[in-house]
Image (spheres, rainbow, N blue to C red):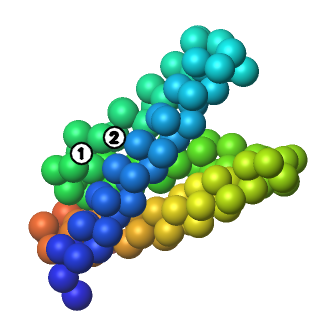
């Protein structure tokens, strides 16, 4: 199986997530619902893996899943506690769910293509 298509889907999904959540948190910061520090605390972690995701580095895709988990908690909480933002929260959760499945698969497939992996101990 070739990793090219999965790479394109994961990269596009992550960029969509970054744009969507940045717009969400910046809007909340501008309207005064969130402080600027709180807004920055939510936006900045999205940019940590961005370079490696754009470049298609399997290791970045593997550890970026951990960062995505924080946003999944945000989406699930928002989905549960509000009716006003239900559609936004549903889109966020679906997108994050797809990325939480796609990222590890891409990392594994691309890692195999590149010959990366854990070395087995010799007995």
Q: Which mark is residue 52?
A: 1
Q: Nearer the viewer, residue 4 or 80?
A: 80
Report whether 110 appears left or right of 88: left
Looking at this rendering, what residue extends furthest in the bottom direction?
1
The residue depicted at 36 percent of the width and 33 percent of the height is 48
Q: Can the viewer see residue 119? A: no
The quarter of the image holding the C terminus is bottom left
The residue depicted at 52 percent of the width and 48 percent of the height is 68
Q: Nearer the viewer, residue 19 or 101?
A: 19
| SS class, disc 1 | helix
Report whether 114 appears left or right of 16: left
The residue depicted at 63 percent of the width and 26 percent of the height is 28
**Residue 103 image position (x, y, % from top left):** 39, 63
Q: Quadrant of residue 3?
A: bottom left
Cα separation, mark 1 vs mark 2, equals: 6 Å
Label count reads 2
Which residue was labeled with disc 2?
A: 49
The quarter of the image holding the N terminus is bottom left
Q: Can the viewer see residue 81? A: yes
Q: Callout 2: few (<14), some (14-19), or many (20+) C-alpha neighbours within 10 Å?
A: some
Report whether 84 appears left or right of 60: right
Q: Callout 1: few (<14), some (14-19), or many (20+) C-alpha neighbours within 10 Å?
A: some
**Residue 116 image position (x, y, % from top left):** 20, 63
The residue depicted at 41 percent of the width and 43 percent of the height is 19
Q: Nearer the viewer, residue 99 or 120?
A: 99
| SS class, disc 2 | loop
1 and 2 marks in contact (CB < 8 Å): yes
Q: Is residue 18 above or below residue 120?
A: above
**Residue 96 image position (x, y, % from top left):** 54, 59
Report whether 99 appears left or right of 11: right
């Amino acid at each position: 199986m070739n990793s090219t298509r999965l790479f394109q889907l994961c990269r596009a999904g992550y960029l969509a997530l970054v744009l969507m959540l940045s717009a969400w948190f910046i809007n909340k910061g501008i309207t005064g619902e969130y402080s600027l520090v709180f807004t920055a605390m939510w936006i900045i972690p999205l940019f940590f893996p961005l370079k490696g995701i754009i470049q298609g580095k399997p290791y970045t895709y593997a550890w970026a899943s951990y960062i995505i988990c924080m946003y999944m908690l945000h989406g699930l909480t928002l989905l549960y506690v509000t009716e006003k933002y239900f559609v936004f929260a549903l889109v966020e959760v679906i997108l994050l769910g797809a990325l939480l499945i796609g990222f590890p698969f891409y990392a594994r497939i691309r890692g195999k293509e590149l010959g990366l992996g854990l070395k087995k101990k010799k007995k």
